Image: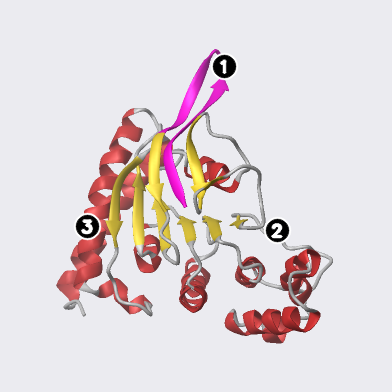
Amino acid sequence: MVVDTVSKSYDIGFRPRVVLDGCSFRLEKGKLTVLIGPSGCGKSTLINIMAGYEKADAGTVALEGQPVGEPAADRLVVFQETALFPWMTAFENIAYGPRVQRNMSHDQVDARALDLLDRVGLRDFRDKYPMQLSGGMQRRAELARALINQPKVMFLDEPFRGLDAMTRELMQEYYLKLYEGSQQTTLFVTSEIDEALLIADTLLIMTNRPGRIAKTMDIALPRPRELKVLTSQAYLRYKEEALEMLHEEAVKAFAGGSKAASDFLEAYADRDQADDRKHEAKPSA
């Protein structure tokens, strides 16, 4: 999938607000690309354009050489908010897409849905309704529901935001296994640098608004990935390089009065100190 010089503005008051300005990058087939940047830089707007929910003011988006128009089954988005049907069980939610599309036999749908339930650790909860599942379980069910449709490209817009730290860590482990078992072409949006580097094949760092790609990093950490990679020297070098660019963009946003940027700068300083203490306490793997 190719994004070529995409720009987007919104009319706010008497003047347009430019959200994206000449944004360009490529999603490599079968790879997991992670997009990170300051709050409000246009990450969600970019996903909406790539998925066909919004139109760009300028520039193009193409999938396998064909321009992206309206939303279609070859592109699926997993949003921050839960979208499971409350009147369906976990199994029924996962099986819903191919049942409606009728692109698999009944037995094929059942077998694939059960396989995905196994892979996300929900087989024993197949007959539970969303309200009977924890937040992390709902997220796992949504990932399985998206994967069963076998889209050409999957977009995940901060899917683990709002989960507590322990649940988020578990979700990252489940997601890594899902991705590494499917090799699904994916664009994953996050605001967490540790999460980004843990899962990414390629990391895209966006500028402060108006958003464009400031830096592209190839993350050559071995797969399958485990959380212990977060203590490796290679990971720490990637993190230092990424944080340097993110810090630069956050400073620009802070100068413009962004509270989110202020919060990021404080977190950046805290993480820097934590990394220093970690190095002093024990050697890296």
Q: Amino acid at mark 3?
A: Glu
Q: Amino acid at mark 2?
A: Ala
Q: Which residue is mark 3?
A: 240
Label 3 residue SS? helix
What range of the chain is rendered magenta? 1-21
Main SS, magenta region, reads strand
Comparing 2 with 247, the one in front is 2
| Badge 3 density bin: few <14, some 14–19, many ≥20, Cα 10 Å | few
Residue 37 visible in the current orientation? no
Q: Which residue is mark 2?
A: 83
Q: Residue at x 54, y 56 (%)?
A: 155
Q: Would you say 49 lies left or right of 59 here?
A: right
Q: Residue at x 40, y 51 (%)?
A: 26
Comparing 165 with 241, the one in front is 241
Comparing 96 with 257, the one in front is 96
Q: Amino acid at mark 1?
A: Gly
Distance, label 2 to label 3, CA atoms, is 36 Å
Image coords of residue 104 (percent x, y) = 74, 74
Image coords of residue 67 (percent x, y) = 55, 43
Residue 176 visible in the current orientation? yes
Looking at the image, tell me whether mark 2 or mark 3 is earlier in sequence order. Answer: 2
| Badge 1 density bin: few <14, some 14–19, many ≥20, Cα 10 Å | few
Looking at the image, tell me whether mark 1 or mark 2 is earlier in sequence order. Answer: 1
Distance, label 1 to label 2, CA atoms, is 32 Å
**Is residue 12 part of the magenta span, yes or no?**
yes
Image coords of residue 29 (percent x, y) = 44, 62
CB within 8 Å, label 1 to label 2: no
Looking at the image, tell me whether mark 3 or mark 1 is earlier in sequence order. Answer: 1
Q: Residue at x 63, y 65 (%)?
A: 146
Does residue 91 lie above or below 62 as drawn? Answer: below
Q: Which residue is mark 1?
A: 13
